[in-house]
Image (tube, rainbow, N blue to C red):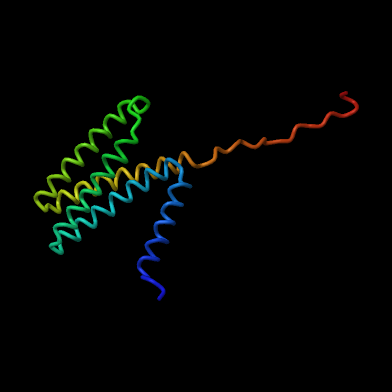
């Protein structure tokens, strides 16, 4: 009569996620991409342990897609210079390693890529904290003296 509870929860989750995406800053969107890739890799490890090969492949494919179509695609190689080029190479390396992990069901490779992504996420959060802090204007140490009749 009331429908499937899981469908309602999923609909709420999707609305919440869409709202979060539309209201997020570009910095927050990158954090969300890192989070999505990290969660996908944890799912891949869980599915390898459970022997669920199809779900493992899907989770690794999702992580690769986030890395290639999200993180890598968001790099501004012109403005980012050497840092962007290095990140591009690192993202390419991670994608290739995950393809290998998928073929071999290799949890150690998944852990390696998970560690790299977690480190990058941490650095990105640290950068964001510095960028998002409002710059403090130095308050004057003493109020200027008002002119008096004698000095006017």
Residue 137 lies in quadrant: top right
Using the image as rendered, state which of residue 46 and residue 148 is in the foreground: 46
Please provide percent x and percent y for residue 47. Answer: 18, 60
Residue 47 placement, left or right of 73: left
Give the residue drawn at x 30%, y 27%. 82
Q: Residue furthest right?
A: 149
Residue under the point 35% across and 28% down = 80
Q: Quadrant of the N terminus?
A: bottom left
| Left or right side of 140 for 82 | left
Q: Quadrant of residue 54?
A: bottom left
Measured from the top left, where is residue 41 in percent x and y?
Answer: 23, 53
* Snapshot quadrant of residue 93: top left
Count of marks, rendered view: 0
> Residue 55: x, y in percent?
19, 58
Q: Residue at x 18, y 56 (%)?
A: 56
The one nearer the camera, 57 or 4, is 4
Residue drawn 31% across and 51% down? 36
Q: Is residue 139 above or below residue 149?
A: below
User: Considering the image in quadrants, where does the C terminus appear?
Assistant: top right
């Amino acid at each position: 009569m009331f429908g499937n509870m899981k469908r309602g929860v999923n609909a709420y989750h999707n609305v919440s996620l869409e709202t979060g995406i539309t209201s997020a800053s570009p910095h927050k969107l990158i954090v969300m991409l890192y989070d999505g890739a990290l969660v996908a890799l944890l799912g891949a490890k869980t599915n390898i342990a459970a022997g669920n090969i199809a779900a493992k492949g899907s989770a690794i494919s999702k992580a690769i897609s986030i890395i290639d179509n999200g993180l890598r695609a968001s790099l501004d190689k012109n403005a980012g210079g050497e840092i962007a080029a290095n990140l591009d190479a690192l993202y390419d390396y991670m994608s290739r390693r995950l393809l290998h992990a998928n073929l071999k069901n290799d949890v150690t490779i998944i852990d390696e890529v998970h560690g790299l992504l977690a480190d990058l996420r941490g650095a990105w959060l640290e950068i964001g904290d510095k960028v998002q802090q409002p710059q403090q204007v130095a308050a004057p140490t003493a109020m200027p003296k008002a002119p008096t009749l004698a000095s006017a």
